[in-house]
Amino acid sequence: MNAKTSAKCTLYVSRTALGAAVLLGIAMPWVLRWYQTLRELGQYGYWAILLGYYLCLPGVVWALLTMGRLVENILEDQVFTAENVRYIRRIRWCCAWVSLVCLPASVFYPPLCFMTVIMAFLALTVSLVKNVMAAAVALREENDLTV
């Protein structure tokens, strides 16, 4: 799969995920009531998941919108730019936000501790990518000044 096809696929998946996250935000109370018929959530599990989801949703939406802008830039062959570094930084902070929200919620619904760890690891990974991208942008800008 070439880079353009991969980027288009990423854009499609991120837009689909954005729509699904918003629709799930609307349906979450009913989905959780259904889930409670399958698995006992405990005294506070329902509210921990519901509150955690709604607190995470803005970060998820912001990350997916930012990812869309980043991919659109890549499709326009604007890869190593300071704007893209800012986009990647925003995505990192969104991952960190979700991790921080899930941490206290995991006290009431312990499986959320896995989401906490996963999102913290993702924030670190995205931070690494951001640092590599920032170095590449600096090199490109230096090379642009060289005649």
Image: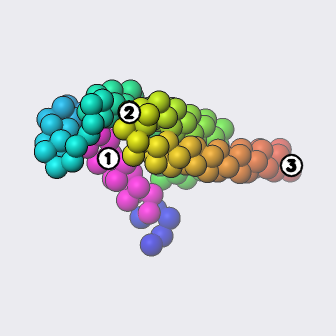
> Type of residue at label 3?
Thr
Q: Which residues are magenta?
A: 6-23
The first of marks 3 and 2 along the sequence is 2
Residue 128 coordinates in the image, percent (x, y): 67, 49
Q: Residues within 10 Å of mark 1 (few under 14, many from 20)?
A: some
Occupied quadrant, residue 49: top left
Residue at image x 13%, y 45%?
37
Question: Alpha-carbon distance for marks 3 and 2?
Answer: 58 Å
Q: Position of residue 24 (x, y in %)?
A: 23, 38
Q: Would residue 19 be counted in the magenta stretch?
A: yes
Amino acid type for the residue under numbered disc 1:
Ala
Left or right: where 71 falls relative to 108: right
Residue type beneath disc 2: Phe
User: Which residue is under mark 2?
Assistant: 108
The residue shown at (47%, 30%) is 104
Residue 30 belongs to the span the image colors magenta:
no
Q: Say which label, 1 or 3, has the lower sequence index.
A: 1
Residue found 82% across the figure and 46% down from its top: 142
Predominant secondary structure in magenta? helix
Q: Quadrant of residue 123?
A: top right
Checking the image for residue 146, the label placed there is 3
Depth check, front residue: 39 or 93: 39
